[in-house]
Amino acid sequence: MGGAFAFAFSAALNPTLLTATMVMLFASEPKRLMSGYLLGAYAVSIGLGLVIVFALQGSSAVSTTQHTLSPAADIVLGLLFMLAAFAIRSDRDARLQARRRARAEARGPKAAPRWRKALDKGSPRTTFAVGVLLTLPGASYIAGMDRISKSHVSTIETVLAVVIFCVIMLILIELPLLGLAISPDFTKREIGRFTEWVSTSTRMIITRALLVLGGLLLLRAAITLVS
């Protein structure tokens, strides 16, 4: 079960969720909008998780996840993450990023996606729908549900595990929402500082994250092969 919750933290690293949180945080009624988004995200993530765990254990989605998590795939992904980290650290991607920025500047300002416009002008009902649409299952989510389905625990414990998994997965919106309830001004100020730090340290963050993920994948592959 602990392995399932590890995938929950991996699933929580969602740039779209972080962007949505920032958009709603500085709206006129952030708590109402974020509450609506969170309820929508809970509805789809918990509901779909229970379906996967109880009804789709032999589905192609789970089979694909099992294949993805095989030692061979772990080795390939781990090496790719390591290579990507090396490329970023050595600035080999800088020229490509410069060309992309030049093309973007030539095209002019990019229009905001529809979901972001909906969050900018929306109501709690709108953000609920956006939360449902944006909380779609990824590889980490499916892998976590697969681990829970194989834990051989009672029905109540399985349901609780799915709920806890989804709570961890949505921590990027839960913590700011809790902060708004306790100290709104402090929360906005600290999240602003965090966002500024992320924007100035993106290369370092991505490099270290890739190195850690690559190392963990290679370690897991080695353990699986020798066990």
Image: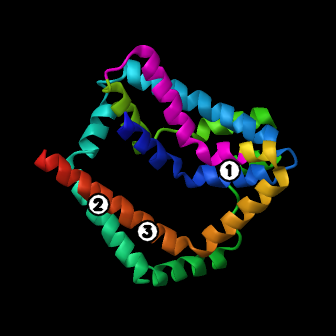
Element assignment for label 3 = helix
Residue 36 at what x, y percent from top left?
Answer: 73, 34
Task: Report which residue position mark 2 lands on.
Answer: 78
Is residue 166 covered in magenta? yes
Residue 17 at what x, y percent from top left?
Answer: 61, 49
Residue 170 placement, left or right of 126: left
Give the mark, 2 or 3, whose residue is nearer the N terminus. Answer: 2
Q: Which label sits on residue 20?
A: 1
Task: Report which residue position mark 3 lands on.
Answer: 208
Between the C-alphas of marks 1 and 2, the distance is 30 Å
Q: Residue at x 13, y 49 (%)?
A: 225
Which quadrant of the rendered structure holds the C terminus?
A: top left
**Badge 2 density bin: few <14, some 14–19, many ≥20, Cα 10 Å:** many
Element assignment for label 2 = helix
Q: Quadrant of residue 40?
A: top right
Colour scheme employed for the rendering of this structure? rainbow
